[in-house]
Amino acid sequence: MAPRTNGIGVQVENTRICVVMVGLPARGKSYIAQKAQRYLAWLSIPAATFNVGNYRRTDAPQPPADFFEPNNPEGERKRRAAAEAAVADMLRWFKKGGVVGILDATNSTKERRKWVLDLMTQNNIEVIFVESKCDDENMIMANIRDVKTTSPDYQGQDPETAALDFRNRIRNYEKVYKSLNQDGDEEDLTFLKIMNVGKQVIINRIRDYLQSRIVYYLMNLHIRPRTVWLSRHGESMLNLEGRIGGDAELSHRGEEYARKLPELVRESVGSDRPLTVWTSTLKRTIATARHLPKHYNQLQWKALDELDAGVCDGMTYQEIADMYPDDFQARDEDKYNYRYRGGESYRDVVIRLEPIIMELERSEDILIISHQAVIRCIYAYFMQKPQEESPWVPVPLHTLIKLTPRAYGTDVQTYKANIQAVSTWRGKGSTAKHEDPSPEKSLFQTH
Amino acid sequence: MDTLLTAEIAANAPRYRRKSSTFIDGIHDVTDQDNMAPAQLYSTMSGRLFHSGRIAIVMVGLPARGKTHICVSMARYLQWLGVKTRIFHLGDYRRATVGEGGNVPQDYFYPNASPASTMLRQKILKKCREDIYAWLNHENGQVAIYDAVNPTAAGRRALAKEFAKHDVQTLFLESYVDDEEILKENARNVKIHSPDFDGMDPDEAAERYLKRIETKIPIFETMQEEELNYVKMINAGRAFFYNNVSFNYLSHRIVFYLTNLHIKARTTFFVRAGPAEGEEFYKSDAPLSEEGRSYAQKMTETLLRHREQERKANSEQAGHEIRLRPLTVWTSTRLRTIQTADPLKEQGYNVRQRSQMSQINPGLCEKLSEHAIRRLYPEEVEKHELDPYHHRYPRAESYHDLAVRLEPIILELEREQNDVLIIAHESVLRVLYSYLMHCRPMEIPKLKFPRDEIIEIIPAAYQNEAKRIHIPGLDPQFTPGSPEDIRIPVPSIYSSNLPPIDGISSPVEPSSMDNVLTRPPEKVVNNAKEMVADKVADLD
């Protein structure tokens, strides 16, 4: 597709992409769709998933395997209607400003794929197909047991019967399934085909940067279990005064937290297995990490430094409200987008954290010691917090947060060090130093 | 090891430029070992990164498949990330062995070559491999790119085995082309300058050249070896097939990079933002002054005039009207850069703001005199003088930090098929420029971009080219050394016995050496084309 331009080289730009998942059931399509959506939404790229199964369920809540027979006309009609409803909703969503829509369905025939492609092309929406192909029978059965038997389709049924029924359902799909470009006549499609969890990958006709970014992200996903630990630095001298930013030393209690941290981490890890530790370049996080065992590998990242408050750096909220009353109010109205004069917004922080997230996705166990705003942003990525909420999430000092990503969402556990610290949380409109988050704001379940 | 021969290879190879000028792309320089790279995130004792050991990236593909372009681009990116990478062109070894103007025997590539030819070939291969091992084993190299045809599956299997014996992992990278158009285009680009095809119709020359490859290298098997790690790049990036047996992150990164690589012609322009109102202060983020707005206007006029002139010239050369490539403008989120783009925006050009392109953060030392810095942070000054590229003053960013944060911009720049105008602070221009022209980290803080010049960078397969376009009619007061410069002292790397810097606001500008670094020639000779001319006979 050539860029549309006028005579003097001015280009119209509005990339919209429909990601069409392809593959038999139990190949991790929903997992991939869900991860991609979360990543894009976190980067402020409006993304949504349209799961055809959910549309079909309203019409046929608990269908038996033969519903999915290719020559069961009733089943075929209902499944077609569900796909049409999902795609129609997606097009409406694109009209309202959507950028990346993900169609989560098997899309296992060439005809179905062509139908989606034509419809999207008519609406000037690019299409990238993402196929997950897997022939490893053990992996498929494991996925069925883990995920599918808990699906609403099988609610209240015996898991083994459910698993068997599901295996039969897949066989019905196998009868008509055509892998992408299997016959060599889908060469013009943009697609990513991942075979046997990344052992082989085909990338075809990537047309723009956003597509390449999605492909790169999906290639870095892995399914090995792992954990991410987050902690703020120990209480700092500026925390005591209720001042933001700065590059202060730890307070006495902050030092105490630094000494306690190794024990807290060991308790949470459950063994002496070494972690990789990432800190910011500011004194308070480096000091917080310095008592961790020598065999932990430590790295300092500039990208993990606290949100830059620009001219307000080192001030108390009261001082900011007095000196820059308009700014103070503007920030409360839209905290995610407000950029401090000469400093950063939460949005800016997310953009600079993007390489960190890419590294996190490909890595295994990592402990991150950073700052309130940065941890809020990383937390928002894993927990899918909307932008209106993420800048207000309470992240108390002297607390270790353990995130365990699972197929559908992330588990959170927190470990309190039981060392007193001031609260640095601030409610909307407030300038008070050391305010306690209201009870309904406490999102973390204490361990 | 036969060091004499190696030195001779380096001397005879047109690919190494020993004298550095920042207006010539330095990608083929043999670098000093201990320098960190522009965007290197960390260093390790072994000098190897990304939890990967030593890797040989073995190129596979017939001539005219764009292997050189791929090798050079990949090396540029990997070195930028800090991965110590070096390209070993087998052709250089063959030329050095056969001698200037010498030819290899006709049956050199034949499977049933005469014993003499086979021995010659073995000798050349052995020398090249020895250099690869020496570099990986004794010079802390991490990625050796082995640029040769490697046409047979048996040969590749043997190669992987041999590398494994030396504890080197192998990733094959095949450039596979079956699109006639791409083949002809590649052949035309490379062969036009060869005396062999002088005066011949370009299409005919290309066809003859492709025929010649076929006769010279009769057997070529595309990669299908299931047990090997390989990436097959099909038709210049139209598709990729990636067979991953044991590789991890680094190869993903390479694939990601390659998916953004293209060979279409385009240009990148760099300009500074105009001067701002009032006193310059990092945190104030001031709007453009009156002069700044007038600068924006003049810069815009100059740029558009230049583009139109180039278009006319190209149209004349081609014999038909050529349309302008679309132009996209990228600015940072700082007011001054956004407003400098206003005249272009008014004409309908697409302007994108990128927060990653904000200027380097000067931290606490902004506006402090050098005396004050020395008094307040004596230890920091000492550290800075040891390593001005990586050291950061309190709360400041180093150039290294800046390079790391600009990485997504660089990939997007590779992908971009439009012409791009980048309006940014000098610190950002320095880093982006150093990526495209492969400057050494120590040079980066010293690069200069006077306001009265638009820098134009034209990418080419072998090396990129830079040009400058003068913006006429500007008040000289606002052109060089404007007061917005980041006042981070940069000790001279060329003479260590200079007296201490007076006043941090004017970084030292010593001697004539500096001029070599900062003043480009008025007209840059097209080195790239001369360099590829000798590739005609290059069938390795």
Image (cartoon, rainbow, N blue to C red):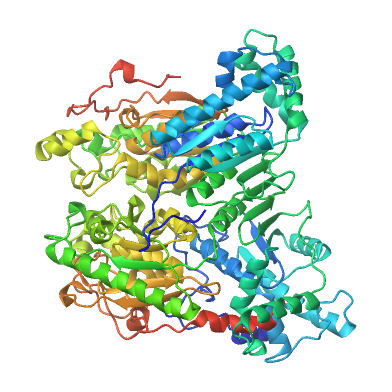
Identify the image quadrant of residue B219: bottom right
Identify the image quadrant of residue B206: bottom right
> Foreground residue, A365 or A382?
A382
- Decide: is A69 above or below B303: above
Query: Does B185 sit left or right of B348 as displayed?
Result: right
- Residue found at the very far front of the displayed protein: B320
> Foreground residue, A257 or A281?
A281
- Quarter holding the C terminus of chain B is bottom right
- What residue do we see at 39% from left, 36% from top? A97
> Foreground residue, B387 or A183?
A183
Q: Position of residue A261 (x, y in %)?
A: 43, 33
> Foreground residue, A307 or A57?
A57
Q: Position of residue A46 (x, y in %)?
A: 41, 36
Query: Does A181 sit left or right of B47 as displayed?
Result: right
Query: Does B525 sit left or right of B10 as displayed?
Result: left
- Residue found at the very far top of the displayed protein: A156
Q: Position of residue B49 (x, y in %)?
A: 56, 56
- What residue do we see at 48% from left, 55% from top? B42
- Decide: is B114 above or below A41: below
Query: Does B277 sit left or right of B67 as displayed?
Result: left
Q: Is residue B489 visible?
A: yes
